[in-house]
Image: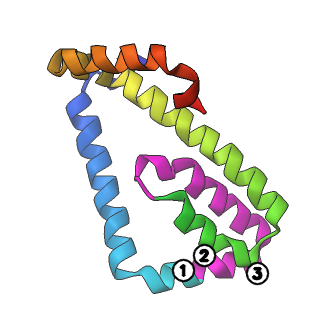
Amino acid sequence: MKYIFRHRKYVLIGWGIVLMLIGYGFLFYRDSLVSEFTGFFLLYPIIGYTLYFLIVSLRGLTFIPLTTILLIAIPFTNHVVLLILTLVGTLITSYIIYRFSEALDIDDYFEKKHPRAINTLRKRFEKYEFPIIF
């Protein structure tokens, strides 16, 4: 997987452009985006659920909170289907973020930049592993 991200700078620039386009759409076309989103659920439930699943699966890369997307979708969907799609989408976005950070060598960057803080965090994670995970 690391060979894909040899040019880390270009990947980060590409993601920056994608984030700016999403932000632009959200800031200037919010009302029309929300009405289209709700229209999908009312007229075409399969397309609406697919769109919801894609947004939930990729939202972690754009730092959009899940609560916002969930509150938009709750009134128009079946709650059991929404729960399943949300859980699977959250697992997918977590996996994507984990793999991207691994491919971009973010761990090496922080270990070189802040070695003392990383060692302190590791010791605390080892000592208080269960409460942190819980």
Judged from the image, the secondary structure of the residue bearing numbered disc 1 is: helix
SS label for mark 2: helix
Most foreground residue, 114 or 94 = 114
Question: Badges 2 and 1: C-beta atoms under 8 Å apart?
Answer: yes
* Residue depicted at 49% across the width and 21% down the height: 128
**Which residue matches tag 1?**
34
Q: Which residue is mark 3?
A: 43
- In the rendered image, residue 19, in percent from the top left (x then y), is placed at 33, 56
Kind of residue sitting beneath label 3: Leu
Looking at the image, residue 87 lies above or below residue 30: above
**What residue sits 44% from the left and 58% below the top?**
64
Q: Can you tell which of label 3 and label 2 is closer to the viewer?
A: 2
Magenta stretch encompasses residue 41: yes
Q: Residues within 10 Å of mark 2 (few under 14, many from 20)?
A: some
84 or 129, nearer to the observer: 129
Contact check, label 3 and label 2, Cβ < 8 Å:
no
* 21 inside magenta stretch: no
Q: Residues within 10 Å of mark 3 (few under 14, many from 20)?
A: few
Q: Is disc 3 in contact with disc 1, using a CB cutoff of under 8 Å? A: no
Query: Mark 2 sits on what residue?
Result: 37
Determine the main secondary structure of the stretch shown in magenta: helix
Q: Work out whether residue 80 or residue 12 is closer to the camera in this orientation and state it.
A: 80
| Quarter where residue 45 is shown | bottom right
Q: For numbered disc 3, what is the local secondary structure?
A: helix
Instruction: Give the crowd class for mark 1: few <14, some 14-19, many >=20 residues within 10 Å.
Output: few
Identity, as a three-letter code, of the amino acid under mark 1: Val
Q: CA distance from mark 2 to mark 1?
A: 5 Å
Sequence order check, earlier mark of 3 and 1: 1
The image quarter containing residue 46 is: bottom right
* Residue kind at label 2, given as amino acid type: Phe
Direction from residue 90 to residue 68 in the image, left or right: left
- Residue at the extreme left of the image, as rendered: 113
